[in-house]
Amino acid sequence: MKLDDKLDRIVRRADELKAMLSGTLGGDAFAKASKELAEIEPVVAKVAELRNAERAYAEAESLLADPEMRELAEAEHQDLKDRLPALEREVRLMLLPKDEADARSAILEIRPAAGGDEAGLFAAELFRMYQRYAELRGWRFEVMDYEETGLGSLKEGIAEITGRNVFARLKFESGVHRVQRVPATESQGRIHTSTVTVAVLPEAEDVDVAIDEKDLRIDTYRASGAGGQHVNKTDSAVRITHIPTGVVVAMQEERSQHKNRAKAMKVLRSRLYDAERQRAQATRAADRKGQVGTGDRSERIRTYNFPQGRVTDHRINLTLYKIDRVMAGEMDEIIDALVAEDEAARLAADS
């Protein structure tokens, strides 16, 4: 279907919904129509903006033939000529299927992979990098679990990042992050390569995932010395195993067993929801070879080279020589580029 036909259909549908809502519609039907209208009204407004610009462009073009009006019309004609492609792109983007998880908050999970203590140290630095980024965006960053192994090395860090469109901004961070640098403990000054895995999960609501209590095995134990921030003598730590999938979540950050269980359930629900999303997207992703990554936790996505002061995102061949600023949470340049690349891939697949 041509773009103009699609836009005409959306505008007609908005008019139909407005007529329905001003009539005798009530109950669930009224709520459903209101929701649909609210979803398409921004598209209708952007369509009106595009068509007004198209009309103004045609008028300016006709004035170019008039010697007396030519000089006045030229500037407007050029301005509209530059603006129209961007407006059309915005409309096309609005017509693409939405990822309903984009507007959600997210669960961030960081773990060292290869590289021993150096991987654990870098995992702790990445955790702080995302915490700073959240602060710069005005999001709430709550540490859910933070297990240290000594010397500032991180064994596992889990955080809840709450705010608008958190998942939309951070979903491309999932994967393997590689660091190249001389470890502080290395006397020979040799560059080591270590890796850290990052997982970003859309936060799930109770209604998203049905979890049957009989499918859970819940164990309690005493928080380990180096792991728990608030070590005590009670069995406050909680480990929940989802028997059908084998997914295990352990929490020991809080003194209260009840709080640790609530946090563990939140993470479990998000992991199960994310797994379901990954399955649903697998076939679609196969058709989008140009997409930004797959979200696969085993995919190497970025290298942080400290001797050269550079950060390279391998999916979009972007290199920035500002590693200190990136580690300080200034990540928008990378994330904006990833979002733009994903939008371009989706537009190409839709055309």
Image (cartoon, rainbow, N blue to C red):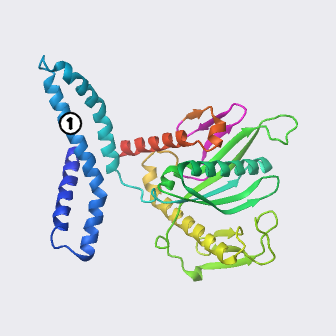
Quadrant of the drawing holding the C terminus: top left
The residue depicted at 24 percent of the width and 73 percent of the height is: 29
Classify residue 192 as left or right of residue 210.
right
Membership of 42 in magenta stretch = no
Residue closer to the observer: 149 or 164: 164
Residue 311: in magenta span: yes
Density class for disc 1 (Cα within 10 Å; few <14, some 14-19, many ≥20) is some
Judging by the rendered image, the residue that carries numbered circle 1 is: 54
Residue at the image position 62 percent from the left and 40 percent from the top: 326
Residue 166: x %, y % from top left: 51, 54
Residue 66 is situated, as x and y percent measured from the top left of the image, at: 11, 20
Q: Is residue 70 above or below residue 310?
A: above
Residue 216, image quadrant = bottom right
Amino acid at dot 1: Glu
Q: Residue at x 54, y 55 (%)?
A: 139
The location of residue 69, given as percent across then percent down, is 14, 21
Q: Is residue 42 left or right of residue 19?
A: right
| SS at badge 1 | helix
Which region of the structure is painted magenta? Answer: 294-316
Q: What's the residue at 73%, 45% (across, down)? A: 194
Residue 340 at x, y = what percent? 45, 41
